[in-house]
Image (cartoon, coloured by chain):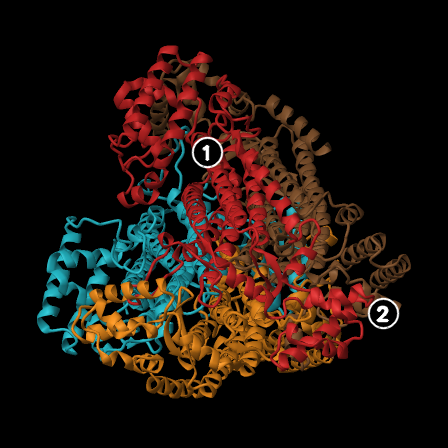
Chain colours: A red, B cyan, C orange, D brown
Amino acid sequence: MSALRDRFQKEADESMQEYTSSLHFDRRLYRQDIAASIAHARMLARQRIISGEEAESIGQGLTSIREEIESGQFEFDTSLEDIHMNVEGRLYERIGDVAGKLHTARSRNDQVATAMRLYAKEAISETVTRLKDLQAALLDLAEANRAVILPGYTHLQRAQPVLLAHHLLAYFEMLQRDVERFGDCLERVDVLPLGSGALAGLPYQVDRDFVAKELGFSQISRNSMDAVSDRDFVIEYIAAGSMAMMHVSRLAEEIILWSSAEFGFIEIDDAYATTSSIMPQKKNPDVAELARGKTGSVYGDLMSILTTMKSLPLAYNRDLQDDKQSFFRTVDTVHSTLEIFTGMMRTIKVNSERTGQAAGESYTLATDVADYLVGKGMPFREAHGVVARLVRYAVEQERSLQDITLSEYRQFSSLFDEDLQSINVESSVAARDVPGGTAPRRVDEALREAREVINE
Amino acid sequence: MSALRDRFQKEADESMQEYTSSLHFDRRLYRQDIAASIAHARMLARQRIISGEEAESIGQGLTSIREEIESGQFEFDTSLEDIHMNVEGRLYERIGDVAGKLHTARSRNDQVATAMRLYAKEAISETVTRLKDLQAALLDLAEANRAVILPGYTHLQRAQPVLLAHHLLAYFEMLQRDVERFGDCLERVDVLPLGSGALAGLPYQVDRDFVAKELGFSQISRNSMDAVSDRDFVIEYIAAGSMAMMHVSRLAEEIILWSSAEFGFIEIDDAYATTSSIMPQKKNPDVAELARGKTGSVYGDLMSILTTMKSLPLAYNRDLQDDKQSFFRTVDTVHSTLEIFTGMMRTIKVNSERTGQAAGESYTLATDVADYLVGKGMPFREAHGVVARLVRYAVEQERSLQDITLSEYRQFSSLFDEDLQSINVESSVAARDVPGGTAPRRVDEALREAREVINE
Amino acid sequence: MSALRDRFQKEADESMQEYTSSLHFDRRLYRQDIAASIAHARMLARQRIISGEEAESIGQGLTSIREEIESGQFEFDTSLEDIHMNVEGRLYERIGDVAGKLHTARSRNDQVATAMRLYAKEAISETVTRLKDLQAALLDLAEANRAVILPGYTHLQRAQPVLLAHHLLAYFEMLQRDVERFGDCLERVDVLPLGSGALAGLPYQVDRDFVAKELGFSQISRNSMDAVSDRDFVIEYIAAGSMAMMHVSRLAEEIILWSSAEFGFIEIDDAYATTSSIMPQKKNPDVAELARGKTGSVYGDLMSILTTMKSLPLAYNRDLQDDKQSFFRTVDTVHSTLEIFTGMMRTIKVNSERTGQAAGESYTLATDVADYLVGKGMPFREAHGVVARLVRYAVEQERSLQDITLSEYRQFSSLFDEDLQSINVESSVAARDVPGGTAPRRVDEALREAREVINE
Amino acid sequence: MSALRDRFQKEADESMQEYTSSLHFDRRLYRQDIAASIAHARMLARQRIISGEEAESIGQGLTSIREEIESGQFEFDTSLEDIHMNVEGRLYERIGDVAGKLHTARSRNDQVATAMRLYAKEAISETVTRLKDLQAALLDLAEANRAVILPGYTHLQRAQPVLLAHHLLAYFEMLQRDVERFGDCLERVDVLPLGSGALAGLPYQVDRDFVAKELGFSQISRNSMDAVSDRDFVIEYIAAGSMAMMHVSRLAEEIILWSSAEFGFIEIDDAYATTSSIMPQKKNPDVAELARGKTGSVYGDLMSILTTMKSLPLAYNRDLQDDKQSFFRTVDTVHSTLEIFTGMMRTIKVNSERTGQAAGESYTLATDVADYLVGKGMPFREAHGVVARLVRYAVEQERSLQDITLSEYRQFSSLFDEDLQSINVESSVAARDVPGGTAPRRVDEALREAREVINE
């Protein structure tokens, strides 16, 4: 009879063993599980619930098991349903019956929750590092192309000229909010559930604060039923990850657009491009496309865990087992996507000639012309109407605003004068000289501040 | 330089190789890929695009590669990004340069779509079989407990007595709609995309109908751009799978409720139960809980693929690569869940004493009393009011409807008479003698018809 | 005391009345509710459960209530929680106590399900009409631009030249699958639940087939518990609607791209464009953007209803009330989006000069050059490599394939010869002369067949 | 010609006006829009961009428009697409052409974003108040039932006895995390976007800090392109709302279970119950069911907005218009659900006799028996096995652990002795005397601390 089945008359059905097993995905928690067990054993000894020798023996056994796993020598037993039972089973083999004392004053419910939280803390730390790496890559690209102007778009129609650096700083801001959100999430992850038992607490004089300190948690959980059934931190990570992926998907979309023949604003490095099995000329931005696509997968994981948690009565239910797959998948996707985007962004080449030319076409200076009229005393709404009719006139004649003569301009408003000539792409950008605006001196300042933020 | 990178000056970045690789999940398509390639090569020879010997050599090479894979001797090369390139790479090793002719008149875009559709056809067939197995298990359980009555619920409040068989037949109906939906999906899957090339069709005199026939497709695709970028069939499968899992989650919820100490209606077999690491008395319905939880994961896959497909311009985009993981995961979840539910349902024991007792308590016969008054000529809405007041009277006195004397009844309506005594659980069930109702003869009929449906 | 509260000692809390009310959204079901009630009353009379006069009176009362609602004279009473209670309440006012007989042999559970299914049947019919309208608009646009060539794209990189008509036909195919899916859904909607009672069937000799015939249902439900708690048809509609919106979102994305200054392939009509409150030059494709955005809302409705239905025990639970808002919202969004897209597509102007020029640039004929070498006997994979190197050579020199001299070509392969000159955009398109390919004669055939399909 | 259409030759198509209009849902932003406009006008005057009289006139005009709206006298013009154009249009009517100066140095993009953020700040404040109200109701219920013991469950199987107060405190903790999450969200909402213009900043010497101060924002946005296209705060609110609703759905599930005849742990007040149109005896917990169902709707809104935002290139795109419906719907659902739950929880009656009895049945003290053996020196895993066999023995004989004699106990282990008798429900609860455990003194302490938290 397998472990823990003394209560039953039968073995588990084989298909059930497979269906309920989580070993193939939770084995990545081995390190966290072992660290928590060692801390738990130390505490048990300190509280004289087990002896110092027993704790020592358990600690050595667990340490050597961790080494076995890391060196690839550990033989996982798929008939034991998870990593926790695998480690415990092996501990019996190594140190004998004293292994049975490790599960004193502990349930798998608080044990699993503890391993998950340890893992989540490390994951968040890694996520923040990678977000900052991508931020740094964006700043480097911005600084290397400090003077590049491109059309800013709304509705994918050219709107007003902006600095490329300004455009890239918009992504810096998005990623900065991501950094903050993961930081907020960390505070709620950083709570030790161990000591909650199965659901009601423990009938032993455990020292939860000691274990928290050993494992680096800054708080202990305040309610045992909540502690074993709470997966908010998983949802919160995936929600923050969904937003981060959404931001990356927006950047990915622009990389794809800008790499197209029609835009031609950038060229991604050959090292980040693929070709076609049939069309020999193709240079495809697959990395950006995959990242865009994988955004859907992270959204799916969010929906998955939210749906799973809905309407579950207290306390632990086995439904919760599925939190791990969603969580690990999202962590992996977010990390690999941020890493490869960092590499790709670092090697992008900007075609500043093309962007500069585009920035001045398509009547992108029309707002400046309207603002010119406002400067001469016309209310903005009226100026908007004048320039709208002027653009319509130019469109019908297939001429640019620059090609229209002053006398033609004056047919639309007598306020137009020679100084109209001073309006150009550079003047347009320089004029947006407000905090957060695209004027070069504001962008310089923003770059400096951004650099400080990631160096914090 | 790797295959297909002659257009570039650099190798792919290593992290990009890893990021873009689909080998770890699309390798399950090897059989479909090889079958499609053999059919393609045969067609090329038939159309004299390659020679008969070349086709023969390709066919033998591919067959032996399939055997290598199935015997575990194939060495997957992770530097080749997918199963298709792995098979092709190995084909070169086995038969030399003639392997290069296989990719004549074919693109990876139509090649992948073909393998996916072959896989989907097989998956649907398997899904339908497993749905029918679960239907059969439900019928067996219903027939074995033909006379068992339990309370029917609305709002989880006891409503009216019903036959357990009637209750189980409700699930039969749900699963039958699932069977139909997968069947509808199959019709749209059963279309050969091969021959669409990269997106525009092919400049070769290919015979698409021949390939379709060889591979067992009943139609060929009508538009090449649609054919290479269409993933409706994946979405449709996952949508149908979401509904099937939703149905199972409802049954799972009832299994969990019925297994609780409070309900005590059934006992699941020890072979499908687990216990606790800390509480020795526990017998937990983990299978039902896991199935309920995994419903969220299938919903997540649906959201994932829908999100990924949104707003993609024609034709193929690399985002599509992620369709496979969602699809395969859903197929696996649906199949394993249906299988294990079939086993679990087959071994459930019903506590008919408990269900029968519950069916008669909690005023479940109140509607019958109202209908009794309607039979005496009172409008239903008025009868409803009379019985509502009567129930309130009984509740306040903590008495059952059976405990109320006729003279007390008559204080609520003079229409009450001796024949009131004939109302009981059995009469209540028998009275619902309409098509679709719970009367025993109707349920017998429904069981017979259901049995015929799954034997079709 | 309000209707139906005789069982309680208290009125409902006011906030609860508001929270549980569905009147503000289910009032749109008034027509279906009244039709079903009239049919039900007729059947009751036919079965002598009520008298002919009573049925007559009920029928007349209901008809006049419908007229009141349609003429705007009906005063909705928000203290009655839904449209069904509003109609019934008004019926009492108009015909007195005989109104109470209408609810004989009926529960609100089967009543609501019947109204919803009647509504769904009409909605599907309307949806299919609008899908066909959009298909027709696409065919008209295709036929009006029969000779227009544009670049086909993969990865948003120019791939191979295709006919615009071919490109538009890809969307025709997607919409055709949508038509089929709604048709499949209709079969499962077309089932009468009335006669199921609250959950167990009815203790009256009702004639369900008669009611089905009166209301135009082709089947009656086979299990009463399933009938009152089944919302598969709502999910299935929203799932089909999600796919239809996904298809529209892809078209929307292309409309947006093609309208950009960079592509410049089309111009949407002023009647479907908006401008900016600040930038007078803007002409924005808001309709396409909104449709793309609203795709998310329909996906959200799908997730909403799937989540709500998960794990609900049989039979009816009040959670189900929320099905209506998701359903109605999706119906409205799908209908309005299809309608406005039809209008927008009908008025689009194509800039064929621009598309034609783009079709020949960016090495889009490279595959044709590779196929040329295959025609001379080179295996495709080898030809692919030769042309890849050739493209790289051209890219480095910033020359097009047309600018490379024959002698330069021959440095890459001696198979190149004078006949290379015959490769151009038109020859490329014409060469893809396979079923489903972009060759003009195939596209003509496809247009003819498509026209037949929508005229069916 | 309508406002802003001078650039076009045609009016907007009527169906397009309807499709693009947001007036029916964004009119709720009138107060925020007007407040922001007044602050903007004041700033323009302060910076001498307009005159003091002009600002005064604009301010008075706007104030009177707000009064018109609040008194129901404002006539909304549906041909003007949103609330902002409605207010501006009316301002022209009231104060003439000077109204046109209000849109100086402002775009609708930063105007809408500002109104949304003002609204979101107020919404969050209200949400937090309502969360705290529900927390207070839970504490009151807990304190009023301080000594009530019920079975704690895992897998919906009775596990170990716990205090009801402890159980309710688990929900207190969940809601507390919700409070924190909304607080974190508030910090990212509290940023003024006004001054960003359409996307690039403004060519006017605006004083953004002044406007921020006037409107109560603690920061101004740092990048104009990000500021007009960022909807992270909407997503973050809905994500936090999804988790809050998930918590409520868990409580709702327990209310439903506990109200069932089978559990019978509580009775909800008649004021929060409904009955059935057909079954006169029914008392249904509709509020809990609706709340559970509406959880799906909030999840759907989350999916909707995430999907909509995916892959949007910078800066503003019209897709964003759909953020409002999802956001407002979620705010309304969260607020009404929290409010009604507070009322319902305050009026619940607990059946402590029933809960107490249940707490001692079904071998809930088995863990205590195992811990007893550990106390005598047996390793926990071994003790677990002994008690598992003992439970199996008792189950087979249909006896409780209390019914087993000491001599029978000793057949399983000689460590059992007379002191075994001291194990009972009360001792079990009292023994879990660790921080976060269910021992009465720990729960008292937790109640005190919780009360302090909400009084902060």
Residue D121 pos. (x, y %): 71, 48
Residue C199 seen by the camera: no
Task: Name the residue at 78% across, 45% down.
Answer: D213
| Distance (Cα) linking label 1 and label 2 | 61 Å
In this figure, which residue is indicated by the disc labeled 2? Answer: D97
- Give yes or no for contact between labels 1 and 2 (Cβ–Cβ under 8 Å): no
For label 1, count other residues whose C-alpha is less than 10 Å away and answer few (under 14), some (14-19) or many (20+): few
- Toward the right, the furthest residue is D53
Q: Quadrant of residue A218?
A: top right
Relative to D43, is C333 on the left or the right? left
The image position of residue D204, as x and y in percent, is 75, 56
Looking at this view, is A77 or D383 the one in front?
Answer: A77
Image quadrant assignment for residue D42? bottom right
Q: Label 2: few (<14), some or many (≥20) within 10 Å?
A: some
Q: How many marks?
A: 2
Quadrant where the image shows the N terminus of chain D:
bottom right
> Would residue D190 be visible to someone looking at this image?
yes
Above or below residue D258? Residue C209 is: below
Secondary structure at badge 1 equals helix
Q: What chain does badge 1 belong to?
A: A
Q: Is residue C393 left or right of residue B216?
A: right
For residue A122, the mark is 1
Marks 1 and 2 on same chain: no
Residue D151 vertical placement versus D228 (above, below):
above
Chain letter of mark 2 equals: D
Q: Amino acid at mark 1?
A: Glu
Type of amino acid under label 2: Asp
Image location of residue C311, percent across then percent down: 48, 52
- Quarter holding the C terminus of chain D is top right
Instruction: Label 2: state its secondary structure.
Output: helix
Residue drawn where x is 81% and y is 64% of the image:
D101
